[in-house]
Amino acid sequence: MNRELASGGTLPGAWTAAWARDPGRPTLSTMDGATVTAAELAERTATAAGRYAAAGLAPGDRVLMSAAPSVDLVIAYVAALRYGLVVVPVNTAYTPAEVANLVGEAAPRLAVLDDPARVSAIPCATPDLAQLPAPVTTQLDTRRPNDVALVIYTSGTTGRPKGAPLTHANLLAGAHAVRIAWHWTAEDRLVLSLPLFHMHGLGVGLHGTLTTGASALILPRFEPAVVAQAIRERQATLFFGVPTMYHRLAGSPHLDALRGLRLAVSGSAPLPADLHAAVADGSGQRVLERYGMTETVMLTSNPYEGERRPGTVGFPLPGVSLRLAPREGGVTEIEVTGPNVIKGYLDRPDADAAAFTGDGWFRTGDLGVRDGDGYLRITGRAKELIISGGYNVYPREVEEVLRAHPAVADAAVAGAPSPEWGETVVAFVVPAGDLDADDLARWCAQRLAPYKRPREWRWIDAVPRSAMGKVLRHELTP
Ligand code: MLC
Ligand code: AMP
């Protein structure tokens, strides 16, 4: 196996080495003209780390981060890792109740938020860390490969959220794997318009950039016109997006701008073959589709050189081993292992028992088959999950909120196909009294992030269930 994938190392170790190789290289930039060179990033993250130390945080403490992408957020994040903190990234769309739930679960010492009013139980700072005391000098970059760098919570299908602890070694293996596979070099310039609280934007976009010693143009949000302007004005070479972003680019007058890129990558949800074709027709760009997960960083990728086959996710990335395990009904589940894969969830032996095989392989919950010549095709999911615009919605979580409404006797949710979002959430409700969709929508708005809220409502007489009481989701027809 490639030495960088197998031997571990830490993210700050790789990043500071890259900065030292070329201190003058612009590493981060924004559309309003700000540029941060490698040397400046080294210095500004050291200063920010000194603020965490001055605030009384100690290496190993957790810090929750939930903010829109910005240079300040990247500095606060990199500084946290250099100081040895464990970062808990949280979706900015979460309601105060959802954030409070994670605060209770993760017990962070500090929250870094655009809007400090979103959290009340612990000290908060904005991404510029202005609320923290003046920096003190502190030790940096002392973490070891098997120390945890990130804990990302997934709501899971049952009970409490599951925390996936990703070590420096896991994340560095993931960053090197895509660096190697996509021929990423220090000369590359990535347009980064993905959120920085999920594996795609953080673990692929940002970590890949910093590990390679390349540069990223940070956009606060995805907008086709701004992405096109960024590609043209900054001679960007790379763009990474979820299928919804390609759908919006394809429906805009800005698709042609993708022509200027060296590589456009899609992931986090299936890229429909007709969208792949529309992007190719309108921009000449043959989008490279890859497959990954929070718990495993990236797993497979279509080839950089050679056929990028629509409807498939290609081959295992460097360092990743993959096998197809037979399941009931003649289907096969994708199981993986490698230096990129977590060893277990935080304090959840029940979840570990379900997610890992006896010989230590991770069950992805995704079903797949190989084409005759080895391309992996994802054919479905063994897990109960709806993916909307690249965000995961766990049906159980939405159902629990609906069932808690006093005028709901029972409820179930399912994903309906959507050209824009991939899937959208549809609710099937058995009313127990007078009830309309507006009441339920208001109820959900107080408790669930917008992307989890049902977009359509169906009134039914009974939720179809198995003898064991399990919702028969395939019998719910959106
Ligand atoms: C926003 N909305 C969504 C939504 N995103 N609804 C369903 N699904 C989503 N994903 C809501 C908004 O709150 C708003 O609701 C309405 O839809 C219209 O919003 P918008 O302004 O059009 O949306 P926008 O803010 O532009 O967001 C769309 C998007 C965003 C595609 C840019 O969803 C996004 O950044 N997705 C990327 C997710 C991602 O990074 N996933 C990676 C997971 S890691 P209202 O009620 O206000 O009208 C992973 C591993 C791997 O999966 O392999 O990568
Ligand atoms: P998350 O838990 O947010 O990391 O989401 C991971 C899940 O996203 C995977 O288990 C897959 O179900 C899905 N996924 C990621 N990339 C792809 C892809 N290219 N095609 C299909 N599904 C994908």
Image: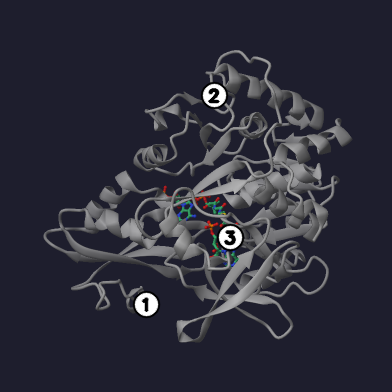
- Residue 385 in picture, x, y percent from top left: 44, 64
| Nearer the camera: disc 2 or disc 1 | 2
What SS does tag 1 mark? helix
In the image: residue 230, left or right of residue 95 = right
- The residue type indicated by label 3 comes to Ser
Q: Is residue 117 above or below residue 280?
A: above
Circle 3 crowding by C-alpha within 10 Å: few under 14, some 14–19, many from 20: many
Mark earlier in primary sequence (1, 3): 3
Q: Is residue 32 above or below residue 380?
A: above
Question: Is the distance from the Cβ of mark 3 to the nearest ligand 1 atom less than 8 Å?
Answer: yes
- Residue 47 in picture, x, y percent from top left: 68, 20
Q: Indicate how the structure is coloured in the image.
A: one colour
Mark 3 → mark 2, Cα distance in angstroms:
34 Å
Quarter of the image for residue 38 reads: top right
Quarter holding the C terminus is: bottom left
- The residue type indicated by label 2 comes to Leu
Q: Nearer the viewer, residue 363 or 68?
A: 363
Circle 2 crowding by C-alpha within 10 Å: few under 14, some 14–19, many from 20: some
Name the residue that disc number 3 marks: 268
In the image: residue 53, left or right of residue 401 = right
Name the residue that disc number 1 marks: 474
- The residue type indicated by label 1 comes to His
